[in-house]
Amino acid sequence: MVQISQLPVDPGPAAWNELLEPEPARPVLATSTTADWLVIGAGFAGLSAARRLAELHPTDRITVLDACRIADGPSGRNSGFMIDVPHDLSSHDYGGNAENDYRQIRLNRAAIDYAMQAKEQWQMSDEAIVKSGKINGAITARGVAHNKAYATHLQQLHEPYERIDAQGMQQVTGASCYVEGLYSPGTVMLQPALYTRNLANGIESSRLQIYESSPVISLQQQGAAWIAKTPQGSVSAPKTILTVNGHLESFGYYPQHLVHVFTYGSMTRSLSSKEVKTLGGESQWALTPADPLGTTVRRLSGTGGHRIVIRNRATYDPSLSVSDERVDQVGHDHDRSFHYRFPMLKGVVMEHRWGGRLCLSRNSVSVFEEVETNLFAACCQNGLGTAKGTISGKLIAEYASGQQSALLDDQLADTGPFKLPPAPVASIGAAIRLKWGEFRAGKEL
């Protein structure tokens, strides 16, 4: 039996969720119950796994457990990019070798297709999910070199892109600091909390029950069943799927193989009509940095008004927790990044600040396997949880159901995460690498 003594900590509010009207809380698991399938974790991977199980086994009982409210965890704390083309955060040009990139493109586009089918099935709004593309924005000569390398890589993959000059970047963003951009058309943008809420509401039924605020505190196999205990109840199911990303290590699997990173975001208050006019540019756009350790920026309009999101900085935190003080400290860097890009918005302050967990591996692969008999895991999304979580959740449900497909073969091609060095070495090495990368990013940060 595995005892889970510590739960991950999500500091600050899930800002995307804060923009939405509160929803009635789902029930807390407070009884001992049984199911045909148990899914632990209700983020992109968990909800996609539950959705696919319901499609494959319409008469089966499916239970989903989550430690917090829907969209309050990592699924409501990301930047909302569902990217189709290679986006390897450990690479200087976001790409890898061609064979692996083609495989990742197939998986990413299958994730987008599955998400867009959900949009159509449950009549989600464009605010929740829309195909809009994204821009890699460059501020420095180093950023331009990154974009040039990325463009060459996309050309080799026969993927479309468009170069945007400084004037074009200002027309889009309102900011004069960007010297060029690289637009790729296939990215789907999410209001991640709204999409996740819509997905949870869509899949829930009399046979698919989602329990919130019901963390699993122990998991053990008894006979032919897996039994997950929560503080107030338990679920017994013959097959269980773990979709808990880096929290997988807390369940006893892949110790000292997973790299636990926190990234940080800040969101402005709603801009006034005068500020919107002063800023100029388009009302909605999405920008990833040319340098992987630079600043991601989104401008949004819709529920919650016109706002700008700044996301940068990363820290290595194997404890799966950081303090609110850390978030506040990083917030000063966000303020500098914001005012450097948008000096015309002097009176605009950040309304929300937060931290969000990522799980990476040294070799940029996921955990996708049957870790024990009838216990399956789709975890370690390498910082790309919207796309990789969606498709790995769908495919782990198919794998656990005995399905076969070429796409599943693509997912199974990952060899598993490499082991990390001893803890002190890993901590020091990760901290140095992140600091050096941020230093080299310069004004891209």
Image: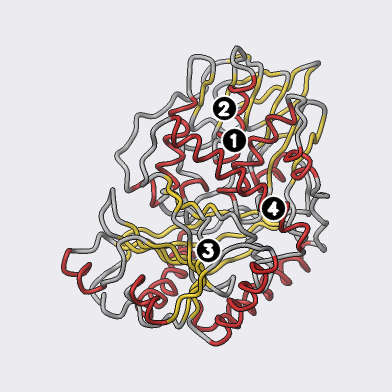
x%, y% of residue 180?
Answer: 47, 79
Nearest to N terminus: mark 2 or mark 4: 2
Q: Which residue is mark 2?
A: 64
Separation of marks 4 and 1 at Cα, in angstroms: 20 Å
Return the residue found at the far top. Answer: 59
From the viewer's side, name the closer residue of 383 and 232.
383
Amino acid identity at mark 4: Gln
Q: Which residue is mark 4?
A: 104
In the image, taking residue 263 as reference, residue 36 lies left or right, namely right
x%, y% of residue 228?
Answer: 66, 25
Q: Are marks 1 and 3 in contact (CB under 8 Å)?
A: no
Separation of marks 4 and 3 at Cα, in angstroms: 16 Å
Nearest to N terminus: mark 1 or mark 3: 1
Nearest to N terminus: mark 2 or mark 3: 2
Q: Which residue is mark 1?
A: 46
x%, y% of residue 161?
Answer: 55, 67
